[in-house]
């Protein structure tokens, strides 16, 4: 089979690999249809951030069941499935409380094991979410990134009736914004420094689209005066500046959900820290996208919204192509962030 293989020097190559074999009774062989590049994959490719090399990445994928081990009784060949990349231990105190995202003994598809950027992959049954027959199988590759924002909403006890602010209009942010729109948010504000992303946010239903390169925190607050109460802010950009901005623009008793992963140290000025106290903010750390019962309501909600065609995916896609074009597009990033989802598409 063909596989997109990452080598330690940042080289992305299409190589011939053996079709993986079932090894345990709960293994499932999946034929890949669609697989997306995640922002977290970029340091694995270009900054020697993978657990080993060479490696086939890919944890945002969907496809069809080909075969499975003797302990798998609830799947049939040809069933459409999406990857649930985390494999928690299910036995530690965190797992027993249903806090699967917090398991410290986990495995992860496409990071600690081979992933879906190939024609076939073998994963555990627990790593697959069966898709309804009425949902296009290609859309299943978006379920995992959709659930990232939904997990933050769950931690915040939902977004119904709240004034939702999304800081960072990348793929995760724009998916979360659309979910907020469909789940009853009173208003939705998108904040970014990229005018094109902000224009896209408007077309996807943002009440306001604000450029934080052109506006100060005070300017943004003045725009949001009508929406300063019952506020839920999702920080999805993952930079020190946007974390500080999220605190500075927050209204009284706002919830601030920190979703983006920082790769540089965050230093808070005493005046910024003081705003957390003086505005009585609630800070929520949101890690991954799972809840109980496994894999969680996030996955059910994402599937329902996609099946009902309430989310627009095509405007978020920067590239969709075969293995060769996928590899070329990834290598051309040279470590820079994606400007839209890069998808591997297989017949």
Image (tube, rainbow, N blue to C red):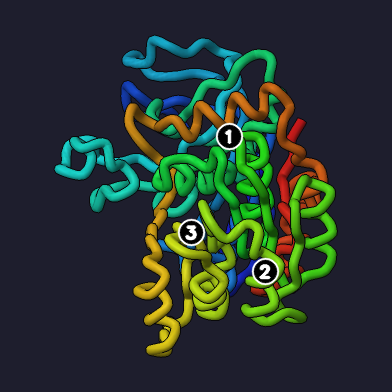
The CA span between labels 1 and 2 is 27 Å
Closer to viewer: mark 3 or mark 1: 3
Closer to viewer: mark 1 or mark 2: 2
The CA span between labels 2 and 3 is 17 Å
Q: Earlier in the sequence, mark 3 or mark 1?
A: 1
99 relative to 111, above or below: above
The C terminus - image quarter: top right
Residue at left offset 51%, top offset 52%: 230
Viewer can see residue 129: yes
Residue at left offset 84%, top offset 59%: 199
Residue at left offset 26%, top offset 36%: 98
Q: Which residue is mark 1?
A: 120
Closer to viewer: mark 2 or mark 3: 3
User: Mark 3: few, some, or many residues within 10 Å (few <14, many ≥20)?
Assistant: many
* Residue 170, x across and y down, in percent: 68, 59
Q: Which residue is mark 3?
A: 259
* Residue 175, x across and y down, in percent: 65, 46
User: Mark 2: few, some, or many residues within 10 Å (few <14, many ≥20)?
Assistant: few
Q: Is residue 14 left or right of residue 325?
A: left
Labelled pair 3, 1 in contact (Cβ < 8 Å): no
Residue at left offset 48%, top offset 40%: 158
212 relative to 32, above or below: below
Q: Is residue 8 left or right of residue 176?
A: left
- SS state under label 3: loop
Labelled pair 2, 3 in contact (Cβ < 8 Å): no
Q: Is residue 242 left or right of residue 197?
A: left
Q: Earlier in the sequence, mark 1 or mark 2?
A: 1
Disc on res. 337: 2
On the image, which quarter does residue 184 sit in? top right
Disc on res. 180: none
Viewer can see residue 325: no
């Amino acid at each position: 089979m063909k596989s997109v293989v990452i080598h330690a020097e940042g080289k992305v190559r299409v190589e011939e690999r053996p079709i993986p074999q079932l090894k345990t009774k709960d293994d499932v062989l999946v034929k890949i249809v669609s697989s997306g590049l995640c922002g977290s994959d970029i340091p694995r490719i270009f900054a020697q951030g993978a657990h080993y090399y060479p490696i086939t990445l890919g944890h945002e994928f969907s496809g069809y069941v080909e075969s499975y081990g003797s302990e798998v009784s609830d799947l049939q060949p040809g069933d459409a499935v999406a990857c649930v990349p985390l494999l928690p231990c299910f036995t530690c105190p965190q797992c027993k409380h249903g806090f699967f995202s917090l398991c410290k003994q986990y495995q992860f598809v496409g990071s600690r094991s081979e992933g879906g950027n190939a024609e076939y992959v073998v994963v555990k049954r627990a790593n697959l979410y069966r898709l309804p027959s009425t949902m296009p199988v290609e859309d299943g590759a978006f379920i995992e990134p959709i659930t990232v924002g939904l997990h933050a909403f769950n931690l915040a006890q939902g977004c119904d009736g709240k004034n939702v602010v999304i800081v960072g209009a990348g793929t995760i942010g724009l998916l979360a914004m659309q979910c907020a729109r469909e789940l009853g948010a009173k208003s939705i504000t998108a904040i970014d420094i990229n005018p094109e992303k902000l224009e896209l946010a408007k077309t996807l239903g943002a009440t306001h689209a604000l450029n934080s390169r052109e506006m100060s925190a005070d300017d943004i607050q003045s725009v949001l005066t009508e929406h300063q109460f019952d506020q839920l802010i999702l920080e999805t950009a993952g930079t020190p500046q946007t974390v500080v901005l999220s605190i500075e623009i927050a209204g009284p008793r706002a919830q601030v959900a920190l979703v983006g992963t920082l790769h540089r140290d965050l230093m808070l000025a005493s005046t910024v820290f003081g705003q957390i106290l003086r505005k009585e903010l609630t800070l929520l750390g949101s890690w991954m996208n799972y809840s109980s019962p496994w894999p969680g309501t996030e996955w059910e909600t994402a599937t329902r919204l996609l099946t009902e065609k309430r989310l627009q995916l095509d405007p978020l896609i920067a590239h969709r192509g075969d293995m060769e074009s996928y590899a070329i597009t990834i290598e051309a990033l040279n470590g820079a962030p994606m400007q839209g989802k890069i998808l591997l598409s297989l017949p």
